Image (cartoon, grey):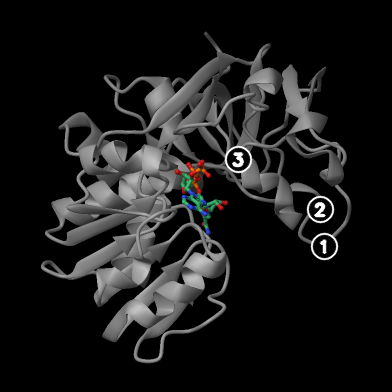
Amino acid sequence: MKAIVVTEQAAGTAGMRLVKRPEPQAAINDVIVQVHASGFVPTELEWPSTWTDRLDRNRTPSIPGHELAGVVTALGYGTTGLSVGQRVFGLADWYRDGTLAEYVAMEARNLAPLPGDVDFTVGASLPISGLTAWQGLFQHGRLQAGQSVLVHGAAGAVGSMVTQLAREFGAYVIGTGRAADRQAALDFGANEFVDLGNDALEDVGGVDLVFDGIGGDIGKRSAGLIRAGGRLVSIVGPAEAPPAHGLAIDFVVESDPAQLNEIVRRVRDGRLRTNIGNVSTLDEAVATLNPKQRRKGKTIIRIRP
Ligand SMILES: NC(=O)c1ccc[n+]([C@@H]2O[C@H](COP(=O)([O-])OP(=O)(O)OC[C@H]3O[C@@H](n4cnc5c(N)ncnc54)[C@H](OP(=O)(O)O)[C@@H]3O)[C@@H](O)[C@H]2O)c1
């Protein structure tokens, strides 16, 4: 099969190569999925799991990509819940070969059915950004209707999902980002926008929840904005400065088929709009994943055109 591999962390996305690899075999409780579309988060090349297995042994050359939509072609020993020929989407294991390939072996429990009227490109754009937004707002952030949420990077892949889900839930959303992203953030439903390059973040006043997808100095300054009992939820590592009156939580997104069902239901009925940027074929993937211009939205590689 054709697959994108990486061998050297220092090379970043420029070190990606399109190669031929043997097709994967299904282990216990696995399925083999013929990948139709794959998502990719550029920072995944910084994660140790891209380079090693769970025992910290080098597993390169490894296949990156953890989001997919495709069709089940085989079941492993003892696998239940899915059948051959079924359309699926989901989040592949961090420590195994991923989805920038024609086939992937992954645990069936990490997949949800993809309804027939949802395009594979859309399906592949949802798992990481949708689940991260859902888990950050509702599980870790314990968002309540009527609360205020400060969403850093509100026009990004995760931030745009956070903004829409929080608004649907009845929150007041203040999005942040670069000046050029103001209109996009407002279009995704932000009530207000803070241009981090020109506006004073501190003018926001107090909020109940900060959803931080940027970190660094922005994360540090946000801690002071948390109201008593509020939460600073970070998806970019532990908060450097915990809030004085609230709780700081950082987490890594987990697979959850029930939440995937909720997310795709909202896409189908128009409550949730996915944020897709460039779409390219597997043959052009290396160039697309090394863009010459600023990337906007999620890059999707359409493995089967
Ligand atoms: N913990 C988890 O489970 C988890 C899950 C998903 C993602 N993540 C992480 O979350 C982060 C966001 O992911 P994503 O896929 O949403 O990325 P993305 O699509 O690039 O969105 C990030 C947004 O924030 C903006 N931004 C970044 N730094 C900024 C700054 N200093 N000032 C103003 N705007 C800034 C970006 O603009 P520019 O493009 O112009 O920089 C972009 O619009 C990444 O670091 C990713 O690794 C973590």
Q: Provide the secondary structure element on which disc 1 rests.
A: loop
For residue 201, side relative to residue 238 (left or right): left
Say whether residue 82 is visible: yes
Q: Which residue is mark 3?
A: 106
Residue 153 image position (x, y, % from top left): 41, 51
For residue 132, side relative to residue 6 (left or right): left
Could you tell me how far apart the alpha carbons at marks 2 and 1 are, in whole angstroms? Answer: 8 Å
Q: Residue at x 84, y 38 (%)?
A: 11
Residue 220 image position (x, y, % from top left): 50, 75
- Numbered badge on residue 55: 1
Residue 67 image position (x, y, % from top left): 53, 37
Say whether residue 250 is visible: no
Instruction: Give the answer, above or below, for where 298 lies relative to 79.
Output: above
Q: Which residue is mark 2?
A: 52
For residue 286, side relative to residue 118 (left or right): right
Q: Residue at x 79, y 54 (%)?
A: 53
Callout 3: 10 Å neighbours few (<14), some, many (20+)? many
